[in-house]
Image (cartoon, rainbow, N blue to C red):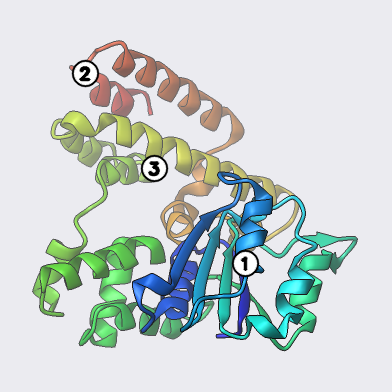
Amino acid sequence: MRRVTWVCGPEAVLARDVVAAHRDGVSPGQCVTLFAGAAPEREVWDLLLSLPSEGGRRAVVYGAEKLKDASAMAALVREDSLATAFAVFVSSAPDFERDGGALVPHLAALQASKAGQLVRCCEPSKAEDRTALVASWWPGASRTLAYDLLTRCGSLERAWHACAQARMAGLAPEARMLAVACPSEPGGELADLLIAGKRAAAAAAAREAGAEVAAVIGLLAQRLSAIELISAGVRSGLPAREAASRGHVDRFTASLVLPHAGAYDAERVSRCRRLLAFAESAWKSGARDGVPEMLVAGW
């Protein structure tokens, strides 16, 4: 870890890992948490540029993308008297901010300084790297178990939470504990069956939907949006998988909708959206009987 770090990227769970490494082995009294936008910006910089107490300081600034004047960053990385004052800026932006292709000044100052570093948190492109990462979150887990857990969870974020739950519960890293560590997504089965066009199975799942109808509607809306992004890319001449990547469709959602995206032309997507709007309106109005069955019948 360098003294000043800027973290961004689409995988918030990996940014969490960077913050954990930043604070590893440091006493709570040395840790400071700040929220850009919630406190006056001058107070944030005044604290970061102040001399730390004996033993040093570890500051984490969340919402760093909200900083309106980061010109003090150059002083922060240059000031030798702050050698024991570490800071991590956590931005929710998907990438480093640029101006005309070049990094904005405060990020350029970090990149140019030996005291600074830029970290963009993205899902590893190789399956073996993703599996190794998940295995590291559940001590003792084999690569096979980690692969099964990631497949079941569908995203690094959900896999991290599943591993955290397993650790806190003291679950042994065994295959039989997967169902305990990562329960199925509410409404996921019915939404997947409808997207896949498996009407008979969807009708059976609808009878068991219960209070999950709101989750089903949300998942279907999300997956229709993914299908629209992929279809737009395909119409422009891209292969379906590349269209999903360029449309920033997460890998889990892409794996669910890619096999079926061809069955959804613009007219069907529009019809399904109207159906979802009607179902949501009925659900919010208090209707509880027949809403999931209506979704199955109209899909």
Q: Amino acid at mark 3?
A: Ile
Residue 256 sits in quarter: bottom left
Quarter holding the C terminus is top left
Q: Identify residue for label 1.
A: 48
Q: Can the viewer see residue 166?
A: yes
Q: Identify residue for label 2.
A: 290
Residue 157 sits in quarter: bottom left
Q: Position of residue 247 (x, y in %)?
A: 63, 53
Query: Disc 1 to disc 3, how far (Cα)?
Result: 50 Å
Q: Single out the mark in the foreground, 3 or 2.
A: 2
SS label for mark 1: helix
Q: Is residue 246 left or right of residue 174?
A: right
Tell me the crowding category of disc 2: few under 14, some 14 to 19, or many 20 or more residues within 10 angstroms, Cα based: some
Q: What label sits on residue 218 in the rendered view? A: none
Q: Is residue 296 left or right of residue 72?
A: left
Query: Disc 3 to disc 2, how far (Cα)?
Result: 19 Å
Quarter holding the N terminus is bottom right
Q: Is residue 79 left or right of residue 142?
A: right
- Please report whichever mark, 1 or 3, sits nearer to the chain's N-terminal start: 1
Q: In the picture shown, does residue 109 fall above or below 244?
A: below
Q: Is label 3 in contact with label 2 (beta carbons under 8 Å)?
A: no
- Please report whichever mark, 1 or 2, sits nearer to the chain's N-terminal start: 1
Q: Amino acid at mark 1?
A: Leu
Q: Single out the mark in the foreground, 1 or 3.
A: 1
Q: Residue furthest top?
A: 285
Q: In the picture shown, does residue 276 fall above or below 204?
A: above
Q: Position of residue 109 (x, y in %)?
A: 80, 75
Q: Identify residue for label 3.
A: 195
